[in-house]
Image (cartoon, rainbow, N blue to C red):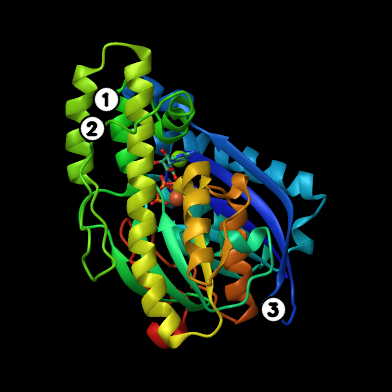
Amino acid sequence: LTVLGLETSCDETAASVVRLHPSARGGRAEVLSSIVHSQIDDHAAYGGVVPEIAARSHVEMIDGVARRAMAQAGLDHADLDGVAATAGPGLVGGVMVGLGYGKAVSLARGLPLVAVNHLEGHAVSARLGAEVAYPFLLLLVSGGHCQILEVRGVGDMRRIGATIDDAAGEAFDKIAKALGLGYPGGPALERLAQTGDGSTIDLPRALLGRKDCDFSFSGLKTAAFRVAQTCETEQDKADLADAVQAAIARQLSERSERAMQAYAETHDHRLFVVAGGVAANKTIRRTLEATATRHGFDFLAPPMAYCTDNAAMIALAGAERLALGLTSDIDVVARPRWPLDEARALSDPSHR
Ligand code: ATP
Ligand code: MG
Ligand code: FE
């Protein structure tokens, strides 16, 4: 199955062609092209993503980006089996652009349309680098979400825990902003942390010892803001960056550990996957891998290029749905909010 994927839910205009080869282990994904146009320069002056600017930029870029993805794959629309577009959650103005473009391609070329949940895209992104059989335990850590899910099959997920306030990526971004590092803050904070030593900075440990698998980053954020005000030198800032990164890594690891213990009681096949933009952080990858190994879990993270937003993960999620006959009606609407537990809803006939 060969699918064109479109992603416009935030500040990346992206298109990709992915071919899914069937296999006993759930399918091998071949990325034929992946184009990502980042709007970072358009938003940098505002210290964050401005929805109206994002939507306009998607309108300007989507056709060129999609054509480049087709050209780089060396394919004609006749070679496609379907078109998949992010239908939410995200900034709805942007989502409407990609979904509308996908509908146009679907109608003009007579191709099935698959409306994809952006988070389902992140959930399958590790499958772009390796064959992964369902089920698996997933830590989804992105700019807007921080959740642990049991992924049972295509679009079939059960949420085990979630953040009660900020997402991990959001914490990275806000603390980085307080340190004057600009947007997006995660990669900049990771770079700065390399030259720091945060071992003497005391940051709060949230939810320690709690039996559930929820997260909380607002206390850490407030404490980090306070320390940031006392930073005088570049070294002070680097030390704080290191402390913040270590604290986030530690909480992600501690909460995942709880989930692994519960998951292991009911599953013989033990695989732990981390995905989303924050999964690009090397300290966090390393910490989680060590934790997974310690608990007898295999560990997998997406290739670096597919941690942050991209369309290859959307094309793959679309291909997996298409293989099961889960397509969408042409009048499917963009959804600003769309919890993953309801991910089947937009394309499963039994939910219509
Ligand atoms: P969502 O997927 O929840 O809708 P999003 O699409 O904006 O949100 P992603 O693109 O998955 O989020 O990830 C972006 C987030 O990842 C940002 O918060 C960014 O700071 C963070 N991030 C990216 N690289 C790193 C890194 N190396 N270290 C820490 N955080 C990072
Ligand atoms: Mg982004
Ligand atoms: Fe995302």
Q: Residue at x 62, y 54 (%)?
A: 312
Q: Is residue 260 left or right of residue 72?
A: left
Q: Is residue 168 left or right of residue 70?
A: left
What's the amino acid at mark 1? Ala
Provide the residue designation for mark 2: 224
Mark 2 touching mark 1, by CB under 8 A? yes
Q: Quadrant of ligand 1?
A: top left
- Image vertical order of residue 156 relative to residue 162, above or below: below
Crowd class of label 1 (few under 14; some 14 to 19; many from 20; radius 10 Å): some
Q: Which mark is residue 25?
A: 3
What residue is disc 1 on? Answer: 178
Q: Earlier in the sequence, mark 1 or mark 3?
A: 3
Does the beta carbon at disc 1 come under 8 Å from ligand 1?
no
Question: Which of disc 1 and disc 2 is earlier in sequence?
Answer: 1
Q: Quadrant of residue 262?
A: bottom left
Amino acid under label 3?
Arg
Q: Quadrant of the N terminus?
A: bottom right
Please name the residue shown 64% across and 46% down the image: 66
User: Which quadrant of the rendered structure holds the C terminus?
Assistant: bottom left
The answer to whether residue 116 is left or right of residue 223 is: right
- Estimate the x, y position of residue 335 in percent, counting from the top left: 35, 60
Residue nearest the observer in this picture, 150 or 257: 257
Between marks 1 and 3, how big is the CA–CA gap? Answer: 45 Å
Q: Is residue 33 above or below residue 103?
A: above
Q: Number of labelled discs?
A: 3
Q: From where the camera sits, is residue 181 visible?
A: no
* Residue type marked 2: Ala
**Whole-percent x, y for residue 164 in the image:** 21, 57
Q: Secondary structure at mark 3?
A: loop
Foreground label between 2 and 3: 2
